[in-house]
Image: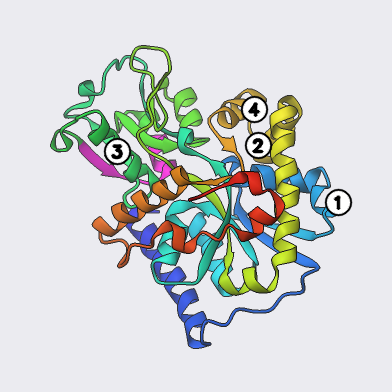
Amino acid sequence: MNPRRRFSFYARGLSAAILLVAISGWETPTFAQTKVVIGTGKDPNLGAPLIIAQEKGYFRDAKVDVELKYFPTGGDTIAAFVGGSIHLGSSGLTPTTHLRARPYPVKVVARVSDISGAQQLVVKQSVKSLQELYGKKIGLLRGTASDAFFNSILKSYGLDASKFEIINMGPTEMLQGFVRGAVDAVSLWEPHSTRARKAGNGKVLVSATHSFLDGKPVAKRVYGDHSVLFASDTYVKENSAAIRAVLTAVARADEFIEKNRKEAVAMLAKEFNLEPADMADVMSVNRYTLQLDEQMAADMNHLARFLHGLGRIKSVPEAHEWIDPAPLKAVRADLVKLQ
């Protein structure tokens, strides 16, 4: 699908869902606390700890009946959330920021993962510097983390934006275009970037957290992105026990991933249909944690300003106003580091 049509389809669907709720006075359906439906993408950056918590029985141990529902895109997850078919959602910051800026009373109750390292600029093996890409075609998806990440590369590495030819394309088109040589570099995220590297004789030149310009990783954070767990303001107020139970289970899943990496890799590789080695690579650039901190808040604000500057959103939501740390503080106060 053409990227512009894809964005238009997402926007129309999201707008219609929000209008439906608006007509009813922002009321959201009331759900029994014994059952919690969580929506997420079939994406290791978004759903890995949730899957571990389900497979290992951590939700059951926390006495909460969780159903995981998978959606193809973050926009679909948001539409399902607004439509009332899920209670909580796990998605990247871009779709959730779009929703909050409508405005819509959504609250971030925890982080799922710091996915900054999963944002990567993939080039051919022969490319040694960013300046070699001047005059070349760069594939990215406008108005998303792909776009915001490349914009951060330009600023952090002092590059002239006018010297690149930007091609607006979705992740599948980026992968195909890179393999065919239709584009010279792609601003992608895992696991798409791993597939691009393997299929297109590529390598990561820079990521949002590291530079590989000298052939080895050097820490250099240029952009921050996160997957977050969110709920409506009403649901947070009326179902705090259920949210605390979910967070308790996911905290155990994070600990399992940290201490039992080999088993976690095997479980998730099967779930996401990836080779174990590729799954291990994806997980190595994610930091699975519920932690709420000032870096995450700053990254949320940065993205909101970027999207507003593009005209994608009409207001700039301030992170501290839509992060609700109370449920996490009740479960793991040590993971709340907001000022």
Residue kind at label 4, given as amino acid type: Glu
Q: Quadrant of residue 158?
A: top left
Task: Check disc 2 and report its element: helix, strand or loop.
Answer: loop
Q: Residue furthest bottom?
A: 24
Distance in Å between CA atoms under marks 3 and 1: 43 Å
Name which residue lies at 52% across and 40% down: 114
Distance in Å between CA atoms under marks 4 and 1: 30 Å
Is residue 72 visible to us here? no
Q: Identify the residue under disc 1.
A: 61
User: Is there CB contact under 8 Å for labels 4 and 2?
Assistant: no
Q: Percent x, y for residue 150?
A: 31, 38
Q: Nearer the viewer, mark 4 or mark 3?
A: 3
Q: Nearer the viewer, mark 2 or mark 3?
A: 3
Distance in Å between CA atoms under marks 4 and 2: 7 Å
- In the visual, does 250 lie left or right of 22? right
Task: Check disc 1 and report its element: helix, strand or loop.
Answer: helix
Name which residue lies at 37% across and 43% down: 146
Distance in Å between CA atoms under marks 2 and 3: 31 Å
Residue kind at label 3, given as amino acid type: Ser
- For residue 31, which numbered disc appears in the image? none
Residue kind at label 2, given as amino acid type: Asn
Q: Identify the residue under disc 2.
A: 273
Q: Earlier in the sequence, mark 4 or mark 1?
A: 1
Q: Percent x, y for residue 106?
A: 52, 67
Q: Identify the residue under disc 4.
A: 275
Q: Earlier in the sequence, mark 3 or mark 1?
A: 1
> Quick one: 198 or 327, which is closer to the camera?
327
> Quick one: 159 or 180, which is closer to the camera?
159
